Image (spheres, helix red, strand yellow):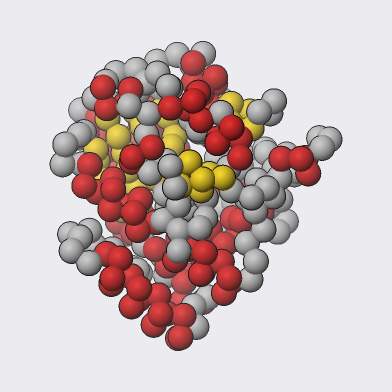
Amino acid sequence: MENMEDWNRRELVDIQGIPLFWGMAEEWSQIETFEARPDDLLIATYPKSGTTWVSEILDLIYNNGDTEKCKRDAIYNRVPFMEMIIPGVCNGVKDLEVMQSPRLVKTHLPVQLLPSSFWKNNCKVVYVARNAKDVVVSYYYFYQMAKLHPLPGTWEEFLEKFINGKVAFGSWYDHVKGWWEKRKDYRILFLFYEDMKENPKREIQKLLKFLEKDLPEETMNKIVYHTSFDVMKKNPSANYTTTPEWDMDHSVSPFMRKGVSGDWKNHFTIAQYEQFEADYQKKMKGSTLHFRAEI
Ligand code: A3P
């Protein structure tokens, strides 16, 4: 691919105070006017919180556990990333326009930036949240391998940016709190990465109930197996290895990196931990949203 330096590693651009990729900012009007359909299922997450994992689970549920059908295409084509627009290269809005219903739609947008058609159509939403310390570690590696992001700097520098919300899709704290509050008024199933690690079958049951769907026990077990980290890591239609190297460089860090809870302990110094926690208490004060930072 030529001229990849033209669109990679550019500075983020603020849209209503939220740093986004330049292409999204340039084409914001297309995103804002996206036409949701009543039977869309929206998968909303802050980056690195288990989006791909829950997407694979949901595509399997939609296809009654048919693992071969779910290898028909890469996950980013089966579940298009709505706001991902790089002019002349890719356009999630356009991809979704030509997709048959029922669609699975991925977004990382904070709740206040979601196109209003999702609310007007009362679409169901599955939100997956992951504890902040594991998210920032995962995000740090992802910034290095996925070249649309600006360079992350050192771990210390990146941690600072994350705490201040100066990363793509903005503040983790505002993102999770915003979607958590919204669930009171709309059809939002709020899941946690840590719960999915602890008991994936239980979380799949929650998804089935939310979708008003039934699957035999045997199919559920098949979905649990097929979406385990080790199996997904080897599955080219789920592990992002089919993206070109100018986009993602898996030799820097694989997309399917570790898939555990608590890896933050291998990265935070004691001083960083203490500073992070003190700031966390302030930012999350008053919220009923609680996370487990290990399981
Ligand atoms: P790590 O970098 O901590 O390994 P997203 O899909 O939102 O970008 O999230 C990516 C994170 O989810 C990565 O975390 C990735 O390894 C992890 N992940 C992907 N599939 C998973 C699975 N089946 N089980 C557990 N973790 C998974």
Q: Residue furthest bottom?
A: 270
Q: Quadrant of residue 183?
A: top left
Q: Quadrant of residue 71?
A: top right
Quadrant containing the N terminus is top right
Q: Residue at x 49, y 16 (%)?
A: 97
Residue 258 coordinates in the image, percent (x, y) = 53, 61
Exactly how many numbered labels are in the figure?
A: 0
Q: Quadrant of residue 253?
A: bottom right
The answer to whether 135 is drawn above or below residue 237 in the figure is: below
Is residue 216 at least partly visible in the picture? Answer: no
Is residue 158 at least partly visible in the picture? Answer: yes
Q: Residue at x 15, y 41 (%)?
A: 184
Residue 142 coordinates in the image, percent (x, y) = 59, 55
Residue 84 coordinates in the image, percent (x, y) = 55, 34
Q: Residue at x 65, y 46 (%)?
A: 148
Residue 264 coordinates in the image, percent (x, y) = 46, 71
Q: Residue at x 16, y 36 (%)?
A: 185
Quadrant containing the C terminus is bottom left
